[in-house]
Image: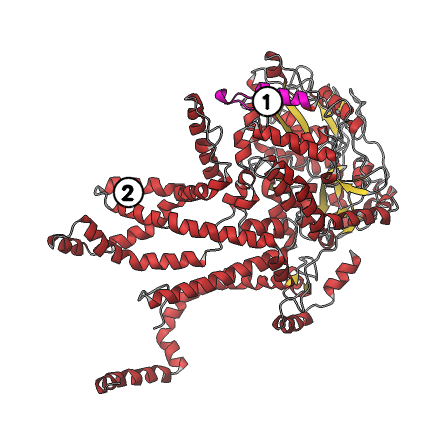
Amino acid sequence: MSAPYMVEAAPQVQEKQAVTKMSVAARLRRDWPLMLMCVPAMLLLALFHYLPALGNVIAFQDYNPFAGDSPLQAFLSSEWIGFGNFQYLFETPAFWDSVRNTLGITAFQLVFYFPVPILLAMLMNSILSPRLRSFAQSVVYLPHFFSWVLVVSLFQMMLGGAGLIAQTARDAGFTAPDFMTNPDTFYFLITSQAIWKDAGWGMIVFLAALAAIDPNLYEAAAADGAGRWRRFWHVTLPGLRPVIVLLLILRLGDALNVGFEQFYLQREAVGRDASEVLDTYVYYQGITVQQWGVGAAAGLFKALVGLLLILGANKVAHKLGEQGIYSKS
Amino acid sequence: MGASTSRRTFLGLAGLGVASTAGLGALGGCSKKPSSTGGATNAEQAAGVVPTFKDSNLIPPDIKGIRPMADGYAKYPANLVDAITEKAITSGKPVTATTPWWGPAPPASNRYVEAVGADLGGTITFSVQDGNTYGDKLNTMLGARDVPDLTCIPGWEINKLARFSDGVHVLFEDLTPYLAGDKANPYPRLAGLDTAAWKDSVWGGKLMGVPFPTDSPFPTALFIRRDVAEQRGIAAPTSLDSLYEFGRKFTNPDKGEWAFGDIFQEVLQICGNTGSQNGWARGADGKVYHRYETEQYKRAVEWMARIYSEKLIHPDLASSKGGDVVTLFKGGKIFSYASGLGSWKETQREMTRQGKGFDMQAVKVFGADASTPPVRWGGSPSIMWTFIKKGLGKDRVEELLRVLDYTAAPFGTKEYELQNYGVEGTHFTRDANGAPKTNDAFTKEFANQFIFLGGRPAVVVSDPDLPHYAQDLVGWGNDATKYLEKNPWEGIKVEVPSEQAAIQQPTDDKITDILRGRTPLSDFDKVIGQWRAGGGDKARDFYAKVLADNGR
């Protein structure tokens, strides 16, 4: 280590010691308005996230909601069976089928769904008339508020065997294609449904990031003779990168969460092999047959895998010089 | 269930320490798989705790039903009896109740509910829940042990409720001390409910709920559009072959027309499959078998797979759970579907009012061919139950039982009319024959609130819009009764162990794959083999043991 570095570092060390030396009471006195402002949010978290999370103990129980004298007692009175629920899960091939499907869908959508909101945001951003832009924006993110039942029946009316495309094809003398019941193209079907429903919604964050890019950069780049493509590559993309990385990490954490309704509704149409995901597995093998402990165990498994993926992805992001979702200060 | 209950309760709080040390050990080494052991209420126990039957019917029926089919009434009675003159509610305390409804929620300020409440002598506060998600609501309510005075639970939801056989005794009042034998005398209308339905209301040897007796035991019927069939000169099906012909003639994709909805449940019965006890039955040799293992089942699967591959079923119904079969049927997009008999009256009435000659009929029961007689499945004698909250005290329980006695008033009483049609002038007017004709205010405010509460002697009544309904339905049912499956487990509440319940869905999925042509028919035997190994054989032993334990 070189001498100048030491000189630079010395005051920092002193300051750090000063912070630790400051008594808790003193810090409280200094920060209490800030802490007070945090209280409602903390209460909300404690009440609706941390407290219910305690219910996860049933993953280690043969849970019976009617044991003991009260619902709370039921958690204490149900029989403890250690890792029995997990063992049951991990020994069932159907569970791994559903994990494989879920991961497959996540991977597919990472490639074919994730970039769509980014592209859409850039398209939107290039509309100059503010009125036209806000109108187009509303149109593309409205479907986010539709339920899956509606989205699936809409696709059915368009692409189904009795739908618009099939009927037009028949009228023209062709055999009607049926996209809705083909297990081989199911990934495409659900991804297009997801894009139609949620791409507009996902666009909002990227639009905000785009708005934060300094227009001077574009002007300067243009003045230096950079074309449309160079400006995109050297100004827009670097500006979006932190947000893209952040959302990518969060998406990875959600890798085992691909939704329930969409798959539940279309299960019979394409069969279990194509459509069973973790959430439908939990529904059919946990809830409908009253194996609540098994359902909770699957939920814990999901959360644990999600946590590991987030931590891992965040680490990789740090290595690549990105900020990630948090950084060690 | 006794053994498993004590096994579950002995650990308690101390278990926390045990489990956390056990958890550190090898996964699986110290752990035990989750298990609900299943159970069955002894049928003989049920006999002693039900009310002594006293017929409460007032009017002789126009069409006598062959039991378990209910009686039919083609004409509305000219003079109604005021059966209950004393007020049921005497404490002045409002009664809370939760019921399901498959339609828009009725308004909270409700003249229909108020009118019946006034006749009862108090207020009834209903929480009407969406019937399609009722099971989820119940699971939460029951799990939190937060139930109203009266809780209505349909039979098909009970199988989805976690540990209901434990929960029923924790949450609800044992009605045996109030209703067993002659103790039911103060409640003559409750004593007039069918004894088989009462026996069906016994959990763990105790009378736990008030039943809603079924008006017909048949879970499904095959409906066709008779008007269109006659117009096009296509005969109603009488065999599996003619059903296929029926399908071919009606399917015309160019016009947006397909013959069928999903009719698999009907095809199973046409081919002679068993189904009253989840498909389990006892053969002539006394051995327990499942319909999966029979030639009849294979035949039904084969036929159905052909129907799917030749695309005789409407594509919307093949592609999503959200497909609405009744709307397609009403709209003339399909011409035959299988459904519960309950949908007959509702569908036909709505279409009759539009006045386009719409005529739907249940097809006379037929077998696959001349040598194969059909089998008709029988449902349970009670469709749903109303339970009284536990620990309200003797006086309150008796008061609530009087309310349920009121709601069990038979056809031909003023109380029955008020609960079924509302207030004359507000909710209905009378036609020339004196029969009530309901209006829009009725449609808005009526959600079967009181009907679902406390049974009623089941009857089939024609409607001014459907003058032949009672004849048609009771006539169909009386014929179908000839083929009613004899269920050896009848009257026993069988709770299937969860491991065996868990094998059902994967097997159904694989059979659906065959039906839809995703896997070849030749895989069928393999699927059944997997089912046997995965829990099917254990389930056979379980069902056989239940029979043996009950001395059958």
Q: Nearer the viewer, residue B188 or B270?
A: B270
Q: Amino acid at mark 2?
A: Ser
Which residue, given by chain and number where applicable, does mark 1 sit on?
B335
Q: CA distance from mark 2 to mark 1?
A: 47 Å
Check whether the beta carbons of the residues at disc 2 and disc 1 lie within 8 A of each other. no
- Subunit under mark 2: A
Q: Quadrant of residue B298?
A: top right
Vertical order, B478 against B503 (above or below): above
Badges 2 and 1, same chain? no
Circle 2 residues within 10 Å: few <14, some 14–19, many ≥20: few
Name the one closer to the observer, B128 or B345: B345
Residue A323 coordinates in the image, percent (x, y): 33, 65
> Residue B251 in magenta?
yes
Q: Nearer the viewer, mark 2 or mark 1?
A: 1
Q: Residue at x 60, y 56 (%)?
A: A295
- State whether residue A2 appears in this view: yes
Instruction: Locate residue B296: give its quadrant.
Output: top right
Assess whether residue A46 is covered by the magenta stretch: no
Q: Which residues are magenta?
A: B241-258
**Label 2 sits on residue:** A134
